[in-house]
Image (cartoon, grey):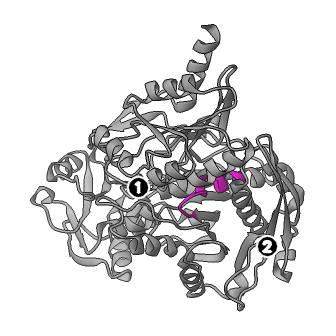
Amino acid sequence: MALSLRACILLLKEHHLLKSAAIQTTEDVDMTGIAYDSRKVSGPTLFFCKGDKFRPIYLSMAKDNGAKTYVAEKPYVEGNGLNALIVRNITKAMAILSAAFFDYPQDDLFVIAYTGTKGKTTASYFTEAILNEARPRHIALFSTIDTVVGPEPNQRFKSNLTTPESLDLFRDMREAVENGMTHLVMEVSSQAYLRNRVFGLTYDVGFFLNITPDHIGPNEHPTFANYLHNKLQLLVNARKVVINAETEHFDQVYAAATTTTYPESIYLFASAGFKPKRDDIDIDFRFDSQEADVAESRFTLVPVTEKAAALNIGGHYSLALIGDFNENNATAAIIGAGLAGVDASAAVPGIAKVKIPGRMEHVQIAGHGTVYVDYAHNYASMKALLSFLKRSYKDPRMLVVVGSPGDKGVSRRPGFAKVLTELGTEAYLTTDDPGYEDPANIVNEIDSKIDHSKVKVHKVLDRKEAITEAIKASGPQDVVVVAGKGADPYQKIRGVNTPWPTDMAVVKEVAKSLQEG
């Protein structure tokens, strides 16, 4: 891979990003490396000075390691002797130049992208499974949990971000193409648009699953309006669009889709009993729940319109990933695979056995309750989870272990208090990625909004101890929910990813000690 200085200048001008250029060499010089981390510079490299934590010494280090050109929003004396491209927006510039450096790998992939406050990961895993049934060993996945860039075990690794930085994203896409991948299923977070990680990227199919307040705070989105705006950008940048017609703010979502997509390329889905408020739209697919219990979920997908029927994906489906709320995610995945050319003959078996790390994992403990570990990490996802368990277990005692991250998602805290008051019996408030905040303050903030006449509250900052106490306090008919972290193997504490054995590992350890004791 290589990119000439001349090409960089032309691309930046084309996107109206270039403010000035100081050329020390000729414009024909090639950069054979690209980086925003000075430690990853080796040889003639295009280096980006980006991020709130950027320090000029990093540019000096990049220069010492062989960088030839730097891109920044202002000149640095540390870059004297290097070609300097001064731009209006560094993150947009990095996205544009990274895509070019890796030779536009998106053009060699059929890209299916999901956004939504909840359900992105589950829908992505469902879609990957269906596509793998039809085209084994050719499906890439970029999710909150895993990144898959090839068919071999060593080409599957844990993700650092839901949507990577643009340079990493296009690098991983190119690697996927070179490994023979033909399709990519990816999650696109609101932060990806806020930080321009996917700037310039177009998707073959873009999904809007739902929207509720989340990721609103000092270090994230300043307002809900900003959060929604960034979510909507996925629809503006998709060739075909699929929307959950039951989403809040549907009118704004649908309007965003129609700005760049013809109505015949927009597909709507909803549950069987949903009645839209508008009579000028048609629901293309309906899903009708047949049974959803603690063993499996079964539902029927019904194509309603002619364009829906043409995909040949209608029929009866079953899911091993329990929870009636997952039928919504499954419907989205089946439609996405259908738009990629995969019909029900592959979708039915492909989706039937899917299990997702940290999603609805459960263990039944003799003499105690059934313990569920789930990534539910905001009001909407927690309410869907607790409501399902409440119905399935006939209104059990519900013991919930939960915390809330520091430095972000401040709006989640009153949301947790609200859902615990509505559906919980006992709450064990604990630590969950406190960052630079005091976990005790986060716990107290959640606790202050809980109605203590309805919910008994325990404050146990040690997460392992909180899980242990909740399980020990449970009876045979009770349900214990350990929420928030899912399969995360670390706690984010003061800028350090501190190893954590995962919630399920702790649950199993407690179960073993109780059985032996």
The residue closer to the viewer here, 275 or 478, is: 478
| Cα gap from disc 1 to disc 2, whole angstroms | 35 Å
| Label 1 sits on residue | 414
Of badges 1 and 2, nearer the viewer stands 1
Asked if one can make out residue 174 in the rendered structure from this viewpoint, the answer is no
The residue closer to the viewer here, 334 or 503, is: 503
Q: Closer to the N terminus: mark 1 or mark 2?
A: 2
What percent of the width, then of the height, locates residue 284?
A: 78, 77
Q: Residue at x 67, y 23 (%)?
A: 365
Asked if one can make out residue 353 in the rendered structure from this viewpoint, the answer is yes
The residue sitting at the left extreme is 77
Secondary element type, mark 1: helix
Q: In the rendered structure, does residue 300 fall within the stretch colored magenta?
A: no
35 left or right of 477 in image: left
The residue closer to the viewer here, 422 or 130, is: 422
What amino acid type should be assigned to the residue bearing mark 2? Answer: Phe
Vertical position of residue 453 compared to residue 96: above or below: above
